[in-house]
Amino acid sequence: MDTITHGIAGALIGKAMFNGDDLFTMRAMSRRRIVTWSAMLGAIFPDADTFRDMLSHNELLVITWHRSITHSLLLLPVWALLLAALTRWIVHWRKWDAPSFAALTGIYAVGILSHILMDLITSFGTMVWSPLQWSRPAWDLIFIVDFTFAGILLVPQILAWVHERPEKSRRRALVSLAISILAVFAVQAIGNSVGAPISSSTVFLFDVMLAALFLIPLLNNKNSSGRTQKKTKRLDFDENNSVSENDSGTPQTNLYRRWNRAGLVCGCAYIAVA
């Protein structure tokens, strides 16, 4: 699986499973943002082994080295502990409020595990038992670059952001829809250029689906616009790693979590039926 899709999946996991916040926001750095950043970085970390490929002239490293020890289930706890320790050092240096070392270790472990499993379902294979065994189990369920899968993971996160603030949802939805439609045409162009053409009917179907996803929920927002607006209480991690209410003044509704959780479920379902 390509690194970008891994990062998208990690961010989705952070939001859906650990109540993380958006990676990029005008809000100050918080525990919930650190949660999402940790899950995302954990999900892309195993591909750090490609730096050795870039610094070496050995063209066989992609076979003998890539997807080995950084993708190992045996070494996963080691990488999670090291990343958690590094994160705690950074947040202490920056004086940010962050989850405990134990919580960060668990988040990084889940992120790294998602990467290993997503590579395992491709045809290239992953050395999950290295350094004890250097074989490459490969389930060969989906292609290494799968734009449909990446879209399933990304679109719900955009929708969660779009509908986070009902008063801004219409503008956000229209802009996001326009960019998403352009992205579909870009994917079609890429497919045609590499000899994997995508039909116009398929592009039209995806565009209709995107329009429905972005525009239909606006009807609900319009119907609820006249309701009394109250400051929304957000959920956050307390010092004991439990979830507690934090009245931060930033709108955060259950709908935000539902979109992300729905994206995670749909992503898993896509792999299951592949």
Image: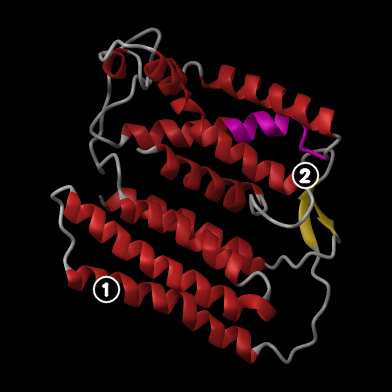
Residue at 76%, 37% in the rendered image: 99
Q: Tag 1: residue type?
A: Leu
Residue at 53%, 75% in the rendered image: 173
Q: Secondary structure at mark 2?
A: loop
In this rendering, the answer to whether 26 lies above or below 179 is above
In this rendering, the answer to whether 38 lies above or below 93 is below
Classify residue 73 as left or right of residue 58: right
Classify residue 44 as left or right of residue 93: left
In percent of width and height, residue 195 lies at: 13, 49
| Rendered image coloring scheme | secondary structure
Residue at 48%, 24% in the rendered image: 48
Disc nearer the start of the sequence (2/1) = 1
Mark 2 crowdedness (10 Å alpha carbons): few <14, some 14-19, many ≥20: few
Classify residue 162 as left or right of residue 29: left
Considering the image in quadrants, where does the N terminus appear?
top left
Total label count?
Answer: 2
Classify residue 182 as left or right of residue 220: left
The answer for how far apart the CA atoms under marks 2 and 1 are is: 43 Å
Q: Which residue is mark 2?
A: 242
Label drawn at residue 205: 1
In percent of width and height, residue 245 lies at: 82, 57
Is residue 103 found inside the magenta-colored segment of the image? Answer: yes
Magenta segment range?
A: 97-108
Mark 1 crowdedness (10 Å alpha carbons): few <14, some 14-19, many ≥20: few
Near-viewer residue (219 or 103): 219
Q: Is residue 72 visible?
A: no
In percent of width and height, residue 106 lies at: 63, 32
Is residue 42 found inside the magenta-colored segment of the image? Answer: no
Q: Is residue 26 visible?
A: yes
Label drawn at residue 159: none
Q: Secondary structure at mark 1?
A: helix
Q: Tag 2: residue type?
A: Ser
